Amino acid sequence: MDVLLNVIFLVLRLFQLILLVRVLLSFFPDIDRSNPIVQFLYDVTEPVLQPIREMLPQTGMVDWSPLVVFLGIFVLMQLISIIA
């Protein structure tokens, strides 16, 4: 059980890092989105961000979905730490 929880924790941490890079890339609008690495980041994170983005109210230019995902991952990681 501990091994499974550690793997889940590691996957969540990796997703956090991937999401952080995607968020940081959004500050550079001149980045070529057809770049395979950038495309990978969007392909991995968009299935998680899109449903949350649709549930949140429109707030203009700010996309709050990454913050919600970071908060969700934080809560899950805390739960895993308590269980493990």
Image: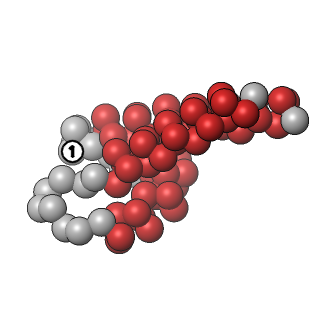
Between 30 and 13, the one lying in front of the other is 13
Residue at the far left: name it: 60
In the image, residue 77 sits, relative to residue 72, either above or below, namely: above
Under mark 1, the amino acid is: Pro
Residue 82, percent from left and from top: 66, 30
Residue 12 lies in what quarter of the image? top right
Residue 9, percent from left and from top: 67, 33
Residue 40, percent from left and from top: 52, 47
Quadrant of the rendering where the C terminus is positioned: top right
In the image, residue 79 sits, relative to residue 54, either above or below, namely: above
Residue 29, percent from left and from top: 21, 44
Q: Say left or right for 60 vs 7.
A: left
Q: Say left or right for 34 vs 77.
A: left
- The residue that appears at 59% across and 35% down in the rendered structure is 77
- The residue that appears at 44% across and 68% down in the rendered structure is 51
**Which residue carries the number 1 mark?**
29
Between 10 and 77, the one lying in front of the other is 77
Q: Say left or right for 84 vs 30.
A: right
Q: Regarding mark 1 in the picture, which secondary structure is present there?
A: loop
- The residue that appears at 50% across and 58% down in the rendered structure is 48
Quadrant of the rendering where the N terminus is positioned: top right
